[in-house]
Amino acid sequence: MLSTALRASLFVSLVAAAACGGSAPPPATTPAAPTDSSAAAASAAPTSTAAPADTSAAACGGSAPPPATAPAASGAPTDTSAASAAPAGSAAPATSAAAAGSDNAPVPTTWSKDLPKPQQGAFMKANVVPALSPAFKAHDATKYADFGCKTCHGHPFADPHDFLPHLTFSGGALTQFKDKPEMSKWMHEVVEPTMAKAMGQQPYDMKTNTGFGCKGCHTVDMK
């Protein structure tokens, strides 16, 4: 307990200070308990594994450094060579359906010596072989039992003019009619007109020298 004299002395002092323009001293406050910031920081779960930004440069008037970029995964390097586009024209060329010896060549409706070889073959298989096979087998079933392309073209394949026997023209007529009359008669009366029809042509006419005749398949030697 303060004595009455002491209390009176304090009151006089306060009044004197206020009268001189001063302010009363603030009341004493109890200091707050210090906050342990390290514990608070440790209790918060980190939201990113990236290193915290360095704010010291920004505080001094500089710019903050860019955020650190996470390094790429350490897996095997990607081989981009396979992904590169193939150069133009590197694809293997497509195989033509009408390649030499192909059975898929389109069959022309009419014969022409200017047809590509595959189409000539297709025409022969579709028109000539079916028409001539019965005629040859009727003439000699044993000799022509396997009538086909090789009968007139041989094996390996050749032009009939090079494979078949040459004929000889002498004295205004083919000598074969004299040397082999039966064979020549059959060829002239059966084979020649049948072949001409299969080729889409008229049989040979001696008066006009036109049409399909012996020279269509045989080489004729003039003497």
Image: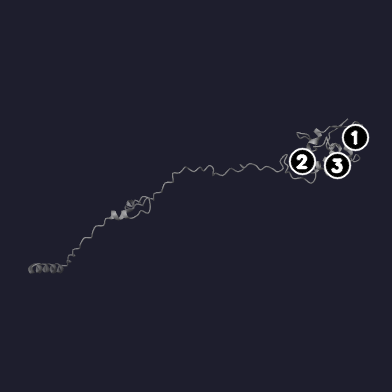
Q: Quadrant of the N terminus?
A: bottom left
What residue is rendered at 90% in x and 34% in y? Answer: 182
| 156 relative to 41 in the view: left or right | right
Disc on the earlier residue, 1 or 3: 1
Q: Which residue is mark 2?
A: 121
Q: Could you give the CA–CA distance between mark 1 and mark 3, rounded to whole angstroms?
A: 17 Å
Percent x, y for residue 54?
34, 51
Q: Nearer the viewer, residue 48 or 85?
A: 48
Residue 137 seen in this snapshot: yes
Q: Which residue is mark 1?
A: 182
- Circle 3: is it few (<14), some (14-19), or many (20+) Cα within 10 Å? many
What residue is rendered at 85% in x and 43% in y? Answer: 197
Mark 1 belongs to which amino acid?
Glu
Mark 3 belongs to which amino acid?
Thr
Badge nearest the viewer, 1 or 3: 1
Q: Could you give the CA–CA distance between mark 1 and mark 2, rounded to whole angstroms?
A: 30 Å
Percent x, y for residue 42?
31, 53
Mark 2 belongs to which amino acid?
Gly
| 213 relative to 67 in the view: left or right | right
Disc on the earlier residue, 2 or 3: 2
Q: On the image, which quarter does residue 168 sit in?
A: top right
Percent x, y for residue 106?
74, 45
Circle number at residue 194: 3
Q: Say which element carries label 1.
A: helix
